[in-house]
Amino acid sequence: MKLAVKIRLFSSLFMLVLVLLVNMSIYYLFHTMSLDRELDDLNMQMNEMVETLNDNPSISQNEMLDAFLPTEGMIRVIDEDGSYVIQVMNANYTELPANYVTSETSSIIAQSDQPDFATVAKPIIWENGDVVTLQVYKQLTSHTSTMETLFYVLVVASLIMLIPTIVAGIFLSRFITKPVQELTAAMKENTAYGNWKKINAADQSKDELYEMKVTFNRMIDYLRENFEKQEMFVSDASHELKTPISIVKSYSQLMKRRGAEKPELIQESSEAIESQADRMQKLVEQMLLLAKNKDREVYEPFNIVELCRSAAETFKGAYDREILFNTTAEMIQVNGSYDQLQQVVYILMDNAVKYSEDAVALSVLKNERSVEVKVADNGHGIPEVEQEKIFDRFYRIDKSRSRETGGTGLGLSIAKVIIEAHGGTIHVSSTTGKGSTFTLKLPISQEH
Ligand code: ADP
């Protein structure tokens, strides 16, 4: 069943039940109150009758009771044996039950084919000294017709009340289902044609449906951005792998063609193939690293000064190069992944060593809420126009030079992904010919 039909059905049914309950209560209340009033009237009439009988013993009881006879009714005087002493009526009501009573009673005698009767019975002392029952019956013709009219009025009122409910249900269902339908149509179009279709979210009302549309549009933007990045990555990666593959291919063809007559070519070719295989291996490893570092690792507080000090020691041991280390504090806690941040420092140190010849300085500076890690070299520097681009994947300023140094163009993009995941920033300041300084800024951990 469609959502719109469900909403309409539910709201109409709900209103129908509500209207029926209210109208049934009105009907029942009116019915009881009206019957009570009829019985009260009859009781009053009975008392008047008894008073008149007692006050005027000289007047014939038959005539007197005739005078009190209701328009549609009957009066009976019943003795102890159940036989009628007097019975006056203005139609044939002899079928109505008679009761000899010892105390005052009142009741309704229900009839299936004609209006009901109200009856009151009271014991009185008759002229011969016997205790008899005076019973008055009144047919409730006007009450029945009033109740009938009320019934039809309430049925019509219920139907009239249902009309606005049905109309409201239609509007409500349209209001709710329209954005859902738009959303479904956009999703169908997106999956069928690979589009990035968004929906119109220009409504004034800032309700949940508006929120749903805005969230959907944001999700489409996010998916599109990621998809395009992924696509770009795949095309960049395949482009980067193409060169070493074609070098490997041409060297192996050379070996096949001329290896037999020129054995020294075999040595040269296998060396070139090996170096290209190494390069491909490094590229693949770094690509995997980049993909992996997008996932957040478990973060815990640790001393970044220690991390930098040990990185400086490692580089000092590995390269024949002066590495200067200085810090403004001995203990600066940051919250993060030790391995990932160590990798970032290694990337910056590695670049500094690769792209300069002199000493490299690694310093740690403590600010009020953040810590700065600086890696400075006196190398050939980075031109200003390139400074933003070097953080892009596979971007290298001087491709041939960086290939010589074994660069892949992925190091700084890996560093950027990691630092941003840690809530930090990375930037470079550099002057061509004088050197570069890379600065990492990370928030200090508040846990101690
Ligand atoms: P690569 O593997 O090529 O070093 P990176 O992403 O680490 O890749 O660096 C991108 C480019 O930025 C490098 O190719 C290089 O041209 C430039 N670069 C990075 N660090 C330095 C530096 N300290 N001095 C000069 N150029 C640098």
Image (spheres, grey):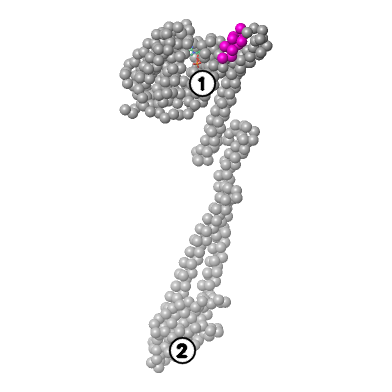
**Number of numbered discs present?**
2
Magenta stretch prevailing secondary structure: helix
Q: Amino acid at mark 1?
A: Gln
Q: Which residue is mark 2?
A: 82
Q: Residue at x 49, y 14 (%)?
A: 387
Q: Nearer the viewer, mark 2 or mark 1?
A: 1
Highlighted magenta segment, given as a residue range: 264-274
Q: Nearer the viewer, residue 296 or 60?
A: 296
Question: What is the secondary structure assignment of the residue under circle 2?
Answer: loop
Residue matched to label 1: 286
Asked if the beta carbon under badge 1 is closer than 8 A to the nearest atom of ligand 1, the reply is yes
Q: Residues within 10 Å of mark 1 (few under 14, many from 20)?
A: some
Q: Up-down: is 263 above or below 150?
A: above
Q: Can the viewer see residue 48 in this picture?
A: no
Where is residue 204 drawn, in percent x and y?
Answer: 52, 37
Which residue is at a point 63% across and 14% down the rendered structure image? Answer: 252
Tell whether 408 sits left or right of 327: right
Q: Is residue 206 above or below residue 106?
A: above
Q: Position of residue 102 (x, y in %)?
A: 39, 84
Q: Check the picture and name the quadrant holding the C terminus.
A: top left
